[in-house]
Amino acid sequence: MTAHIEGSPTTPSDGETALYQRWAHDAAVGLASLAPAMTAAPTPLSPQLARAAQATENTWREIDAEFGLLSSTEAAETMGYGANRTWAAANRKNGRLLGVRRGGGFRYPGFQLTPDVLPVIAHLIDIARQNAWSAESVVLWLCSPSGWLADDHRPVDLLAEEPHAVLEAASSAMAAHW
């Protein structure tokens, strides 16, 4: 018997049922994919570390949804070079394009690809290299609110309009030593 509370439904709506079913399915798939990785770890994993890894993965998925994490071919096509797989790799190796390791290869965040590769990207890569920051760390920093910028803006939102402010913030953030 279900208790009735005034003003609330006693049974879930079709939309709620579908939402619960999707959540249960997604949870089952997620747990099934995590189990082999956790089993393969030679030592026990703390819940905090597992949670941090999942939070980072969620952030990558948000970046992909908002800007795209493009393959080398997709990046070249976006820039008008056709299906040239070497364009993105050459620019990444020469320090002109951010490429992050995802899924066994490199992916290129779409925010840096405008009619031209944003010139500020090469300067950010230089600052990162001087301070031993990985491309992955730079992209995560760019897409997160930064206390080094007014109103805690995300640096990515200011790349085109205020590149000098982003570079100053990057220099401060990446060179910070505790």
Image (spheres, grey):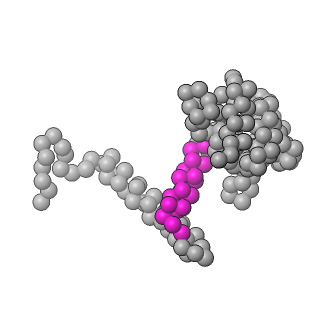
Spot occupied by residue 106 in the image (x, y as percentages of width and height): 74, 52
In the image, 144 versus 89, the foreground residue is: 144
Residue at 56% in and 31% down? 152
Spot occupied by residue 15 in the image (x, y as percentages of width and height): 33, 46
Rendered image quadrant of residue 75 = top right
Q: Main secondary structure of the magenta part?
A: helix
Q: In the image, 60: left or right of 162? A: left
Q: Is residue 71 visible?
A: no
Residue at 37% in and 50% down? 19
Residue at 76% in and 37% down? 124
Magenta stretch holds residue 58: yes
Rendered image quadrant of residue 147 = top right
Question: Does residue 94 lie above or below 111 as drawn?
Answer: below
In the image, the segment drawn in magenta is 45-63
Q: Quadrant of the N terminus?
A: bottom left
In the image, 113 versus 121, the foreground residue is: 121
